[in-house]
Amino acid sequence: MRRAHALEEAAAKFYEKASKLVEDPSLAAALSFVAAESSNHARLIQSLFGTSEGCEGALGTAGERIIAELEKAAAELEGGWKPAPKELAALLRKLNDAEKLAGEEAYSQIIAKALSLELSDVERLLLEAVAEEEKFHYRIVEKVAGELEKRGSPGADRRAG
């Protein structure tokens, strides 16, 4: 469960970096929103379960690969990589799909574990809310990627951030 913390942190960093490349204010705001929500999820998981330190491998090979890909993409964006709009859309879709699979696994584990732990009703409700919010994050990122593809130039100003 604590490895979900690392997944959320990596997603937050990636989406925040990606938001700075998008020219359209509403699309940038959407990615920044997902980044902020992911960061909130990481803080909540940390407060309930601690950090992910020492839990490497808890999401399996696929989950660890997704965390690494999100971290790598964020580092590349931070390093000045400025993907073309369609390239950014493809990257958003790829990482969004991967995060969805890892996230579903992580949150299934969290909810199953929550049922066996002595968590308060409030703590259980918070974990359910996070799992539901993840579904909206997926839809938001999909819509942003679709808009980027349609417009063909959302990163046109190519600013790095």
Image (cartoon, rainbow, N blue to C red):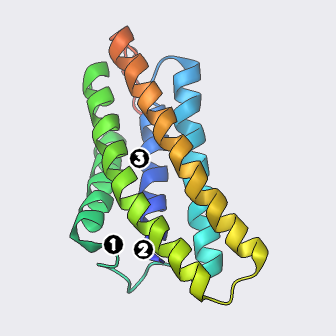
Examine the rendering and report whether any part of residue 10 can be seen: yes
Query: Which of the two labelled residues, at mark 1 and mark 3, occupies the earlier sequence position?
Result: 3
Q: Mark 1 points at which residue?
A: 59
Q: Name the residue under label 2.
A: 3
Which residue appears at 52% of the width and 77% of the height?
A: 112
Is residue 111 left or right of 146 when viewed as pictured?
right
As helix, strand or loop, the secondary structure at mark 2 comes to helix
Q: Are marks 2 and 3 in contact (CB under 8 Å)?
A: no
Q: Do the residues labelled 1 and 3 touch (CB within 8 Å)?
A: no
- Counting from the top left corner in percent of width and height, residue 115 is at 60, 81
Of 38 and 143, the residue lying toward us: 143
As helix, strand or loop, the secondary structure at mark 1 comes to loop
Q: Mark 3 points at which residue?
A: 14
Query: Which of the two labelled residues, at mark 1 and mark 2, occupies the earlier sequence position?
Result: 2
Examine the rendering and report whether any part of residue 155 can be seen: no
Which residue appears at 71% of the width and 67% of the height?
A: 125
User: Neighbour class for label 2 at 10 Å: few (<14), some, many (≥20)?
Assistant: many
Which of the 4 image quarters holds residue 82? Answer: top left
As helix, strand or loop, the secondary structure at mark 3 comes to helix
The quadrant the C terminus occupies is top left
